[in-house]
Image (tube, grey):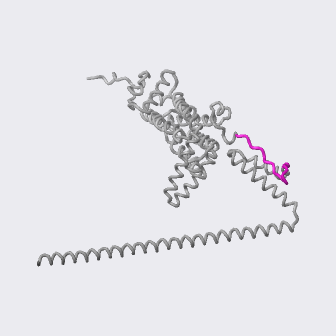
Amino acid sequence: MSDASAVPNIEDIPERIGYLKEICGLDFGWGPTATMEWILEHTHIWAGLSWTTSIVLLGIALRSTMFPFLVGSAEQTGRMRKMATEIKPVQDAYREAARNQDRMKMSQLQLEMRALKDSHGVNLKKAFYPLLIQLPFGFGAWRVLRNCATLPVPGFITESWLWTSDLTFSDPYFIMPAISSAMIYVTLKMNANANQGTASVGGPDAMAILRKAMPVLSFAFVSFQPGAVQLYFVSSAATGLATAWLLQNAAIRRYLKLPILAKDEPLPNAPASTSNGADHPPSSAAAAGFMRTKSSNWGKSRAQIMEEQARALEEQEAKAAQQNRSGIDRAVDNVKGQWTDIKKHGRGFVESVAGSVDEQAASNKRKQREVYDARARAGLEEEREAKNRELGIQETKREGGMRRR
């Protein structure tokens, strides 16, 4: 009979490569989970670091490995932003054709959008590579750390980090979940500002909802996870935030040969207005309007900035010219403008009503023609059947006469 005291205590077994699998029984076979277990254990054993530091480095390593794919995604985002002004009318026409259920038009517009993407070198798969690669390995890291804390691995109980007693209990003050959620929100906000003017599949409303929902969902999920998982999420979110900042730095983007962001593009010079064919500088009112427009240009595309500046200058010049005219002239212009609006709206209403009447008349004609054609076909069929019956009767009589003879 074996002596129970001969069985070694798991806490007394020295940690080595294979400790998590052979001693603790954490065998995940092969795949993303086994890969993250291998990285965690080798970082802890080979580098001689604590489990806490190894978990932090695990989160940093995973997000840092995604950096080349993030660079490719940023390049595709810049290409899509340049393509946005060209593809937007085609997308609007496609939505209109979809509402009208015009299949032929939809196919034609799909080919146009594909040609535009090819001409700009846009490949949407590259934009989603970071997410597709990070998801399975992030799930693997969560699975490994949760099992290590639930088992628990002895080192996870004896180690503490700042205000936490060990790595198997959740943060009692919810500080780490709040930090990771805040960093996720800031990262999404930075990416949204950098990607303004980009041709997106989901629209701006969907992205705004996602930007608000993700931090909330992250906080709700991480709050009740073990401390090891919470520590991993904090390190991963911090690395993601640092990566987002790096990819929005103008100098780094120039070094990586990435497209310039909208916020870093030089502002265009204010267009000079003309009077009697000669150029002259804008008035002080127009200049003030231009400066107000310039102060709110952060995060906008180059085309939007130019359009807003031109509109502001036109409005300010029009107001300045209006103030120099007499009250009678302004009143007459006001009446003329109102009368022009009335005629324009009236003409549009009449055209819409006339168009509806014409469409209804054309539809009625088509229906009448279809009824007439159906009746004509039915008459021809009846006439053909009557002739066939008559020929059949005559043939029968002829055969009967031949038999009597």
Which quadrant, please, contains the N terminus? Answer: top left
When the figure is inspected, residue 328 is found, relative to residue 250, above or below; the finding is below
- Relative side of 73 to 303, left or right: left
- Relative side of 27 to 249, left or right: left
Question: Which image quadrant for residue 327?
Answer: bottom right
* Residue at point 82%, 69% (across, down): 332
Which quadrant, please, contains the C terminus? Answer: bottom left
Residue sitting nearer the eye, 136 or 92:
92
Residue range corresponding to the magenta coloring: 265-281
Residue 319 percent across, percent down from the top left: 82, 58
Residue 35 shown in magenta: no
Residue sitting nearer the eye, 400 or 146:
400
* Residue at point 63%, 48% (across, down): 85
Residue sitting nearer the eye, 129 or 386:
386
Question: Which image quadrant for residue 330?
Answer: bottom right
When the figure is inspected, residue 352 is found, relative to residue 172, above or below; the finding is below
- Relative side of 319 to 39, left or right: right
Residue 199 percent across, percent down from the top left: 59, 47
Residue 153 percent across, percent down from the top left: 44, 30
When the figure is inspected, residue 15 is found, relative to residue 243, above or below; the finding is above
When the figure is inspected, residue 133 is found, relative to residue 90, above or below; the finding is above
Q: Main secondary structure of the magenta part?
A: loop
Residue 322 percent across, percent down from the top left: 84, 61
Tally the marks.
0
Question: Which image quadrant for residue 15?
Answer: top left
* Residue at point 42%, 27% (across, down): 20
Residue 266 shown in magenta: yes
